[in-house]
Amino acid sequence: MDKLRIDKWLWAARFYKTRTLAAEEIDKNRITVNGQTVKPSRDIHIGDTVGLSQGSVRRTVVVQGLSAQRGPAPIAQALYAETPESIALREAQAEQRRLAPEPAHAIAQTRQGRPTKRDRRDLGRLNESPRDVPDWNDRWSASLD
């Protein structure tokens, strides 16, 4: 076998779980072969360079084998070789994600969940200025004086 459809190859190489998902990604122009956007029916050959996006991760691989069957992961990994530039870029992105703090974690570390009734009262007291807080004797009363 010297050629194979790109959607079948992406499925056999375990980049996507189904051929349908691979074809959808190709239709969204997220897959390139030798720098050109392609259709799902495009034939690829050994030695072609395939660029693909999986979420925020961009990978560039060189086709080293063709298989129309989806096999175990070690066999699927033998169908391609990732370029050194792609590996370096992917590792740099992973390191950046690891070092960048998640904004929601800062909130979760200070207080867990919703504020309690006591917390809301304390926040209310902090937000009120001393002039705005009425004295008990200054309140309106329904009693006849």
Image: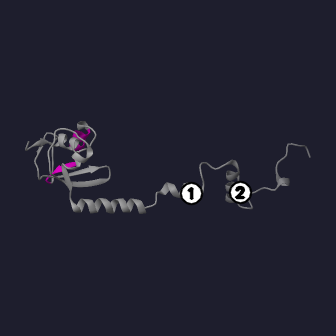
The kind of residue on which mark 2 rests is Arg
The kind of residue on which mark 1 rests is Gln
* Left/right of residue 38 with respect to residue 99 in the rendered view: left
Q: Position of residue 135 (x, y in %)?
A: 81, 56
Q: Which residues are magenta?
A: 21-34
From the viewer's side, name the closer residue of 25 and 71.
Answer: 71
From the viewer's side, name the closer residue of 66 and 137.
Answer: 66
Image quarter of residue 28: top left
* Left/right of residue 72 with respect to residue 64 in the rendered view: right
For mark 1, what is the residue? 109
Q: What is the spatial separation of the Cα atoms under label 2 and label 1, in whole angstroms?
A: 23 Å
Q: Point out the tag, 2 or 1, that comes first from the N-terminus.
A: 1
Please tell me how crowded label 2 is: few (under 14), some (14-19), or many (20+) other residues with Cα within 10 Å: few
From the viewer's side, name the closer residue of 75 and 92.
Answer: 75
Q: Position of residue 107 (x, y in %)?
A: 55, 56
Q: Residue at x 21, y 41 (%)?
A: 12
> Element under label 1?
helix
For mark 2, what is the residue? 125
Please tell me how crowded label 1 is: few (under 14), some (14-19), or many (20+) other residues with Cα within 10 Å: few
Q: In the rendered structure, find residue 53 and report the number of the disc placed on it.
A: none
From the viewer's side, name the closer residue of 13 and 128.
Answer: 13
Residue 23 part of the magenta-drawn span: yes
Q: Residue at x 46, y 57 (%)?
A: 102
Q: Residue at x 82, y 48 (%)?
A: 140
> Element under label 2?
helix
Q: Position of residue 57 (x, y in %)?
A: 30, 54
